[in-house]
């Protein structure tokens, strides 16, 4: 993921990769990462802010300024820090979801490769 994918059409693809807006919101509420908007409109916006902080080199204040200028969030750096502190279990859940999907894809690929390999050996 690049910093550019946080601001262009790639962001919608990222949300879909993670299961869609509804699944993000549900998992954020279950893990108590996002209970009320208070400056951040949605769970996907919180994820975007989190990734912007992790990928960026501008610090917390820079992320808050970027979010305000982009219309993503209106939040102080201290409030964002609190949100990020509460997001750990949610991020772990999202990463676990991605790893399960990746593992399932790899297993499917191994099965397909094994079948194709077996057919070639027989011929």
Image: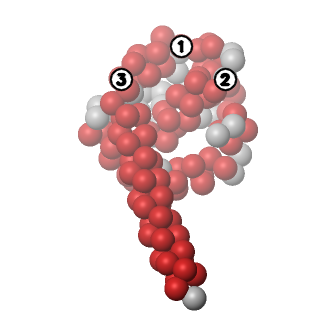
Task: Report, in whole angstroms, how far the alpha carbon at label 1 lies from the one at label 3.
Answer: 14 Å
81 relative to 9 in the view: left or right: left
The first of marks 1 and 3 along the sequence is: 1
Spatial distance from mark 3 to mark 2, Cα to Cα?
Answer: 20 Å
Which residue is more in the foreground, 102 or 49? 102
Q: Which residue is mark 3?
A: 86
**Marks 1 and 3: which is nearer the front?**
3
Secondary structure of residue under mark 2 = loop
Q: Which residue is mark 1?
A: 77
Q: Residue at x 39, y 51 (%)?
A: 100
Q: Residue at x 47, y 53 (%)?
A: 102
| Residue 45 position within the rendered picture, expressed as x and y whole percent measured from the top left | 52, 37
Which residue is tagged 2?
56
Where does the C terminus fall, quadrant-wise?
A: bottom right
Q: Quadrant for residue 52, please give it.
A: top right
User: What residue is at 39 percent from the left and 19 percent from the top?
Assistant: 85
Residue 51 visible to the viewer: yes
Of label 2 and label 1, which has the lower sequence position? 2
In which quadrant will I find the N terminus?
top right
Circle 1 SS class: helix
User: For mark 3, does the 10 Å Cα neighbourhood hold few (<14), some (14 to 19), or many (20 or more) residues?
Assistant: some
Nearer to me, 91 or 43 = 91
Q: Position of residue 26 (x, y in %)?
A: 32, 47
Instruction: Report crowding for label 2: few under 14, some 14 to 19, many 20 or more residues within 10 A (C-alpha).
Output: some
**Residue 25 in view of the camera:** no
- Which sits earlier in the primary sequence, circle 3 or circle 2? 2
Q: What residue appears at the point 48 percent right and 11 percent down from the top-left corner?
A: 78
* Mark carried by residue 31: none
Mark 1 closeness class: few <14, some 14–19, many ≥20 residues within 10 Å? some
């Amino acid at each position: 993921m690049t910093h550019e994918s946080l601001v262009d059409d790639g962001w919608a693809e990222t949300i879909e990769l993670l299961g869609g807006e509804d699944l993000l919101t549900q998992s954020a509420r279950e893990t108590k990462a996002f209970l009320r908007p208070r400056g951040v409109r949605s769970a996907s916006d919180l994820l975007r802010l989190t990734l912007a902080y992790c990928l960026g080199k501008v610090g917390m204040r820079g992320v808050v300024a970027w979010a305000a200028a982009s219309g993503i969030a209106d939040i102080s750096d201290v409030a964002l820090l609190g949100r990020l502190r509460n997001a750990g279990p949610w991020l772990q859940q999202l990463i676990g979801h991605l790893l399960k999907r990746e593992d399932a894809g790899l297993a499917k690929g191994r099965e397909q490769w094994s079948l194709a390999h077996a057919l070639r050996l027989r011929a």
